Image (cartoon, helix red, strand yellow):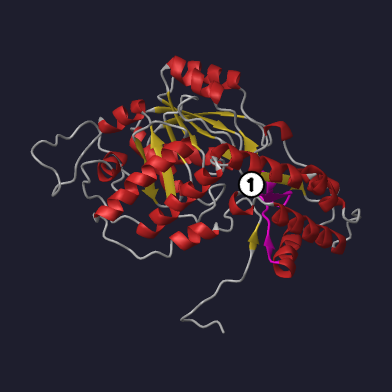
Amino acid sequence: MTTAANPQMPPRLLMGPGPINAHPRVLQAMSMQLVGQFDPSMTAAMNETMALYRDVFRTDNEHTLLVDGTSRAGIEAALVSLLEPGDRVLVPVFGRFGHLLVEIAERCGAEVHTVEVPWGEVVPDDAVEDAVRRVRPRLVAAVQGDTSTTMCQPLAGIGEICRREGVLLYVDATASLGGNPFETDAWGIDVASAGLQKCLGGPSGSAPITLGPRAVEVIEGRKHVEAGLRTDDDRSRGTRIASNYLDLAQVMDYWGQRRLNHHTEATTMLYGARACAQVLLDEGLEASIERHRLHGAAMLEGVRGLGLEVFGDVEHKMTNVVAVHIPDGVDGDAARTAMLEDFGIEIGTSFGPLHGRVWRIGTMGWNARRDAVLTTLAALEAVLRAAGVPVTAGGGTGAAREVYA
């Protein structure tokens, strides 16, 4: 019996654009007992977590660590620590989360410029290059995988442009890291942040982030150690970072050799984040990307087998989520409710101009597997039939099985 003292959540198969069901190893890791934040076992776990995420991000960056908070905390930490009021920022916008970068940069007091394309497309390199030369920004802030449109922005060319023009590059890889190729060092990315609740197979609440040397130099140039902690050797520098909690200069000292107290580490989330990286690297990063590609391709062909029209430029689609147009005459929200109530499966709609026009179906993290794909397609077929949509019997699961064959 469910009681107020012992609440239970219903079983769900989370096949939307995230969050997803956490990997069992991650849940097990998060059940471990707490230790003090400066216990040798805890600092060893922090060091191990940093090393693991260097491999996940494909980087040699010393300052690769966790921001305690959801993926948005990682985004804000990066932008508030890099940007001073009046700095020029360029944001390629191709969905909702590009607009989010614009808002956060504006809240930092930056002068924000955008280069935008219609939802369902990605921003061409030449458009970014033209805008960089026109705006002369200090920072380009880009999303890799925008789940609102399911598009995956190519980054190698943008990284090359930024290096050539002397511009910093920040990338939000929340929805893409672990399931799509991502090369921090090879692509010239100065800062990248992510979340656990997508391809990394964990819960929301911890934001892995990696900081390259050029970014570290900027952040260290704004370092202000808190009164009560600073020593005679600590000299305040530059414009103080506007957030205390998200001040990456202080967070780097907390994770670094100095172990300068900043906040009480979110111990259970660290256990989970470490396990996410361990699971991913035990599988192999390339193997994980291929697994997401395979099950994403099966879901793509499966929804086509149900007669649904795929939204956007499929050539630039993320591996781990697909958007389909809701058929004419079908109440999209009612169908999602039927998926949830009748089958225990969650799929998503989208935001802004796409709200109520598309469903978004994810195959990511622990849920990027054959049984989850086939079960979701079978349930969706039943819901479409109940809504009066003519569907070929077994068309979705049959098309997916051909991909697996």
Q: Which residues are magenta?
A: 344-363
The picture places residue 308, in percent across and down from the top left corner, at: 82, 47
Crowding near the residue tagged with mark 1, few <14, some 14–19, many ≥20 C-alpha atoms within 10 Å? few
Please name the residue that numbered disc 1 is placed on: 352
**Relative to the observer, which residue lies in front, 196 or 114?**
196
Residue at coordinates 51% horizontally, 46% vertically from top-left?
282
The picture places residue 303, in percent across and down from the top left corner, at: 79, 48
**Is residue 322 a member of the stretch shown in magenta?**
no
Q: What amino acid is found at the position of numbered circle 1 in the picture?
A: Gly
Residue 234 in view of the camera? yes
The picture places residue 281, in percent across and down from the top left corner, at: 50, 43
| Above or below, 296 relative to 370 | above
Indicate left or right for 303 with 286 as reference: right
Residue at coordinates 47% horizontally, 62% vertically from top-left?
28
The picture places residue 304, in percent across and down from the top left corner, at: 82, 45
Which residue is farthest left? 232
**Relative to the observer, which residue lies in front, 382 or 227?**
382
